[in-house]
């Protein structure tokens, strides 16, 4: 039995380039279009397909664990190529299953020539099918990582838009805050404002908190840290939209906001600065 598997495996390895050229994705028109304009040259693509076919052949007579590692590495790179070529996950997986047809064509041919025992077919299947499953699994994982990273980038960009630093005049910007502020968003507000303050060479920032529905102990404490961090950079901070209950919260915490100017509204602050006329 081992001799039969070795013979078939060696035949697959010998013919891997020839077999790679037979890998056909013709039933998937979208995949064929993407491949046609791929940045991955056809010659290199054929050679890369041949590698996987060669691994399938080697698996019939080499250490399976070593082959699994090689197959996993192959799948990871194949996933990155597909992602860069904007090929969908479903098309990529359908393409992988076409390798099975090529391998079985070789096996069927040799089976007829050499009169192998029918059980040999089952043994080949037990070795190669799990490898194809590994390829599909790794590709799926790589696509999932890619999509997760895209979502993370999009979410980060959306978060940063939730902390708009709007320059008004040289050295002055306003930060209108809207919505709830939790610990994560407070850190984001600090990171963005510190970065923009340095980038825009700001000397004054006006935080308008009239759009923040609840300013509890935690939020007030976070605002205090943000203001303190900006003051360390030499940026003067003014808070506008302070409601009576917010003032009470600040006082109850014993926070020293004496060095921070506060105004009832953004309009009042801008009028005092001279940007708006009353």
Image (tube, rainbow, N blue to C red):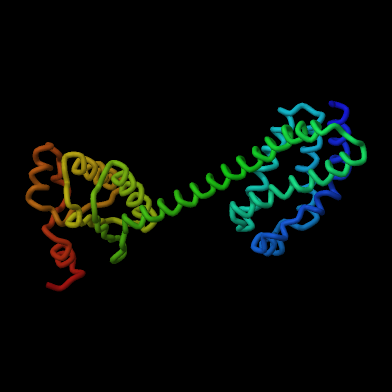
| Foreground of the two, 157 or 52 | 52
Q: Position of residue 99 (x, y in %)?
A: 74, 47
Q: Position of residue 83 (x, y in %)?
A: 61, 53
Left or right: 258, with 153 as reference point: left
Q: Position of residue 48 (x, y in %)?
A: 76, 48
| Foreground of the two, 113 or 102 | 113
Is the N terminus in the top left, top right, bottom left or bottom right quadrant?
Answer: top right
Residue at (70% x, 37% y) in the render: 129
Left or right: 3, with 44 as reference point: right
**Vertical placement of 159 versus 183: above or below?**
below
Left or right: 147, with 75 as reference point: left
> On the image, which quarter does residue 211 sit in?
bottom left
Is the C terminus in the top left, top right, bottom left or bottom right quadrant?
Answer: bottom left
Residue at (35% x, 47% y) in the render: 191
Q: Position of residue 136 (x, y in %)?
A: 63, 43
Q: Residue furthest right?
A: 113
| Foreground of the two, 18 or 69 | 18
Residue at (84% x, 26% y) in the render: 2
Residue at (23% x, 57% y) in the render: 206
> On the image, which quarter does residue 88 sit in?
bottom right
Q: Residue furthest bottom?
A: 277
């Amino acid at each position: 039995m081992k001799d039969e598997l070795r013979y078939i495996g060696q035949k697959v390895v010998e013919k891997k380039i020839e077999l790679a050229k037979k890998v056909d994705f013709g039933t998937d028109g979208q995949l064929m279009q993407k491949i046609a304009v791929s940045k991955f040259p056809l010659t290199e693509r054929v050679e890369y397909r041949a590698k996987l076919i060669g691994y399938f052949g080697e698996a019939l007579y080499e250490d399976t664990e070593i082959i699994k590692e090689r197959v996993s590495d192959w799948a990871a790179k194949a996933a990155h190529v597909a992602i860069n070529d904007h090929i969908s996950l479903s098309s990529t997986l359908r393409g992988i299953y076409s390798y099975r047809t090529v391998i079985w064509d070789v096996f069927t041919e040799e089976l007829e020539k050499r009169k192998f025992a029918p059980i040999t077919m089952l043994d080949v299947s037990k070795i190669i099918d799990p490898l194809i499953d590994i390829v599909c699994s790794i590709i799926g994982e790589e696509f999932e990582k890619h999509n997760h990273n895209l979502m993370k980038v999009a979410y980060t960009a959306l978060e940063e838009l939730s902390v708009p630093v709007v320059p008004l005049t040289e050295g002055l910007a306003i930060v209108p805050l809207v919505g709830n502020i939790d610990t994560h968003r407070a850190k984001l507000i600090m990171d963005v404002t510190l970065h923009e303050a340095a980038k825009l060479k700001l000397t004054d920032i006006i935080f308008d908190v009239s759009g923040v529905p609840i300013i509890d102990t935690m939020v007030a404490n976070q605002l205090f840290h943000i203001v303190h961090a900006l003051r360390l950079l030499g940026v003067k901070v003014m808070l506008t939209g302070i409601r009576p209950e917010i003032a009470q919260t600040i006082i109850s915490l014993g926070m020293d906001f004496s060095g921070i100017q506060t105004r009832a509204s953004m309009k009042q602050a801008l009028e005092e600065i001279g940007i708006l006329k009353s």
